[in-house]
Structure formats: structure tokens, C-alpha cells
Image (tube, helix red, strand yellow):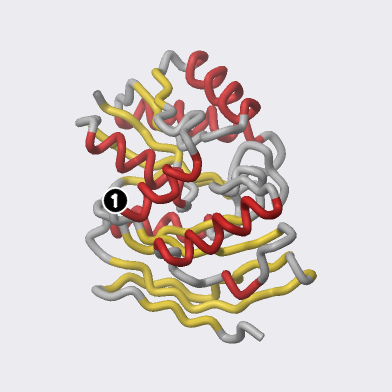
Amino acid sequence: MKVAALYSGGKDSTYALHWGYLQGLDIECLISIYPREYSMLFHYPGIEATVYQAKAMNINILYSKAVNNEEYTLYSLLKEAKERYNIKGVIAGALLSDYQRMRLAFITEKLGLSLYTPLWRIDQRNYMKEIIKNGIKFIITSVSSYGLSHKYIGRIVTLELLNEILVIASKYRLSPAFEGGEAETLVIDAPLFKQKLMIKGRIIKKGPYEARLIIDKIDLGDQIRIIIESRD
């Protein structure tokens, strides 16, 4: 079946894409939307990297900025994907948000498309470990929760670092997969990537537990390269 994948560039949308590939789905294109800074439907930090990620995977991408109505923007892009690539379904990395899943279901049903949400209500702790074990390498691009400081930004989340994060999640009752907006992620390498992301950026701190990575330059290459101007 020909499908499109909703893609923010983070761990969830990449894992869902990986799942679709393993299921034998024909992934025709990625759908990426640059949302308003606060969005209940789309992720924001690092979204500008999706064009490079699509190139790294050699997959077509339909990309747009959401001006006012995000749902209409998504509807329009999926409609275009259906007309251009003859897609029959959509893959999404929705994990816990009822609002997100309901809105996606409404839009896809309206277009006569099947919706695949392979991560829905998955055990978050085991899922985070599975991401890493499946060869998906990601960094944290923003933090906005007590217990998570700017020191985590720009670091590749290994199993060792994940265990540290899971301890913090238990202590402060955070979502292990950051579904409460505690942090955002960006995938820099994965099994479907033919090239790896090389990133140069800087950290902007808004408080002791709120910071984000501003990406100044992105490129593709044979090796991962992450340059952060300052972590102080």
C-alpha cells in the first residue's frame, strides 16, 4: 500500500516510519508542517531539519508552514499527496495525545485514507529502549520541565543516558517518552538514512529548566557531527 508519513524529524515519527517500512508499506512521501510556536497537533523544535532528513532517506517531502489553521494545512498537504502519489494511507507517530489522534483520524477519514498509529498507548519505557536498539540515533533539542536542564540538549541519547532520564522521569513523574512536552528530539541517523545529519547550533536558555537548541547550520555527510557553541 502506498502511504505518506507525518514527519516532524523527531524520534516518534521516525520510529513510526521505520515500522511502516518493516511492515512492507510503500512510503511515497513525508508530510512536514512548520507549526505555530505552540501547537497541540505538531511538534516544533528542529522541524526545519526535515528537508535534510528526507534527502538523507531519499524520500519525497511535502512541506508547508501553518499560518492560522493547522488542520486545514494538514488536510491540504494530504490531499496533495493523495493526488500526486496516489496514497491510500497515512502513518503517524501519535503516542498518547487523544486530541492529536482524534484530529488525525477525522482528517484522514475525510480524505478516505487509512490511518496507522503503531505507537498508540505503547509502554513508554520499553519503547524508548526499543528506539535506541533499532538503531535510531536522536538528540534532545529542547527541555521544558523540572529535572531536565540544558545540559541534555544536543547529546545523543544512548541507553546509558536514557537510564539517567528514566530515573528523572520516575522522580518527578514525567512522561518517559516526553509526551507531556518535557522535551523534544531530533533524529540524526537511522536505518533508513543513507547519510547522517551534521548540525551546528547554540542553546538558548529561558530558565533553569527551559532551553532549546537553535540550529544555525545543517548538512549531510558520512559521519554524525554535532557542534554546540556553549553549554554553560
The tally of labels here is: 1
Q: Secondary structure at mark 1?
A: loop
**Residue at 44 percent of width and 77 percent of height:** 226
State the image quarter where residue 17 is shown: top left
| Kind of residue at badge 1 | Asn
In the rendered view, would you say 76 is above or below 132?
Answer: above
Residue with the most extreme left position = 24
Q: Give the vertical position of 42 relative to 139 (above or below).
A: above
Residue 84 image offset from top left, x and y in percent: 33, 31
- Which residue lies under the disc numbered 1? 134
In the image, 160 versus 128, the foreground residue is 160
Q: Residues within 10 Å of mark 1 (few under 14, many from 20)?
A: few
Quadrant location, the N terminus: top left
Residue at 32% over, 29% down? 3
In which quadrant is the C terminus drawn? bottom right
Using the image, determine if residue 16 lies above or below residue 178.
above
- Tell me if 183 is positioned left or right of 223 in this view: right
Looking at the image, which residue sits at the far right? Answer: 207
Residue 41, given in percent of the width and then of the height, sits at 62, 37
Q: Position of residue 179 (x, y in %)?
A: 60, 43
Residue 214 x, y percent position in the rendering: 60, 71
Which residue does the image show at 51% across and 29% down from the upper left? 121
Q: Foreground: 147 or 214?
A: 147
